[in-house]
Amino acid sequence: MKLQLLSDLHLETEDYTPEPAPGAELLVLAGDIDATWEGLAMFAGWPVPVLFVPGNHEFDGRDIDTVVPALTDICARIGITLLHRSSRVLTDAQGKRVRFVATMRWSDFDLFGAAGRERAMRSAGYFMRLMASTRGGALFDAAALRDEGLCCRAWLEAALAEPTEGRWDKTVVLTHFAPSLRSADPRYGRQPSTASFCNADDDLIPHADLWLHGHLHCRHDYRVPRAGREPSRVVCQARGLAGKGEADGFDGQRVIEV
């Protein structure tokens, strides 16, 4: 299956018009498309199916528990599919069945182990204040975010452990947050705040043939060896903010094959 991957378009502030990639059979939106949600209308009538896993900015200024139901309804009206802690099997032009396993995978702040968790959670305070989200009237803080991250991790681990039994030929994981320190933005290096962007899901990567993510405003394409099988591939195709030079080298027409 040939995929087009877009994330971190930030259409709430950025001037960018997405276009279908020639040859793509599916478009994947890996989050942070538009904090206002209005930009999602750009994908109405897209010539191929669209799968959308939301990003943290889709939750900005909102009650956390209301976002996924509301976005699901909007996406249904537009004609795209929102996935979060849910899966979908699609068949490509050659008859290959591809399972898409999707969750935001919020940060659990364990990127540097239990010893680094407290510092990582403190560093997340800045991002949480910018996000300004709530749950039941209370601030959605780093502790609440960690709880969500652990729920995402548990769901994803269980989904990837499901027996194939001939039900699909390939597995693609879709997350907004990154699954490995290898996806960290090289501009900032290894620091506590990196745990707000990457999780330590390296043990789960070999269960996927392809792992697509966003959140980091840079591009990645690397492979993780698997015994007796082709390596797993991890790809981030984030655009980022043009004013910071993050969109330099971005190719929105790139096609990824699984």
Image (tube, rainbow, N blue to C red):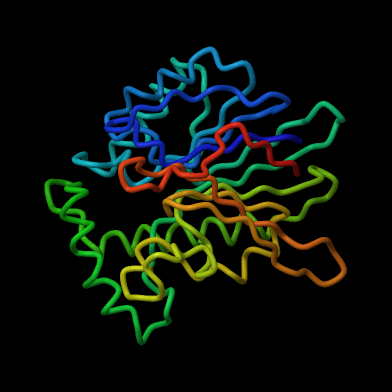
247 left or right, relative to 127: right
Residue at 87 percent of width and 69 percent of height: 228
47 left or right, relative to 85: right
Q: Where is residue 40 in the image (x, y as percent from the top left)?
A: 40, 24
Q: Can you say whether 178 is above or below 10 in the image?
A: below
Foreground residue among 258 and 254: 254
Residue at 18 percent of width and 61 percent of height: 126
Q: Give the residue furthest to the left.
A: 137
Q: Give the residue furthest to the top.
A: 45
Q: Can residue 134 be seen in this view?
A: no
Q: Position of residue 136 (x, y in %)?
A: 17, 46
Foreground residue among 17 and 161: 17
Quadrant holding the N terminus: top right
Q: Can you say whether 202 is above or below 67 in the image?
A: below
Q: Position of residue 189 (x, y in %)?
A: 40, 72
Using the rendered view, name the quadrant where residue 93 is placed: top right
192 left or right, relative to 95: left
Q: Can you say whether 224 is above or below 175 in the image?
A: below
Residue at 42 percent of width and 82 percent of height: 113
How many numbered badges does the structure rendering display? 0
Q: Position of residue 182 (x, y in %)?
A: 54, 68
Q: Is residue 228 visible?
A: yes
Foreground residue among 231 and 254: 254
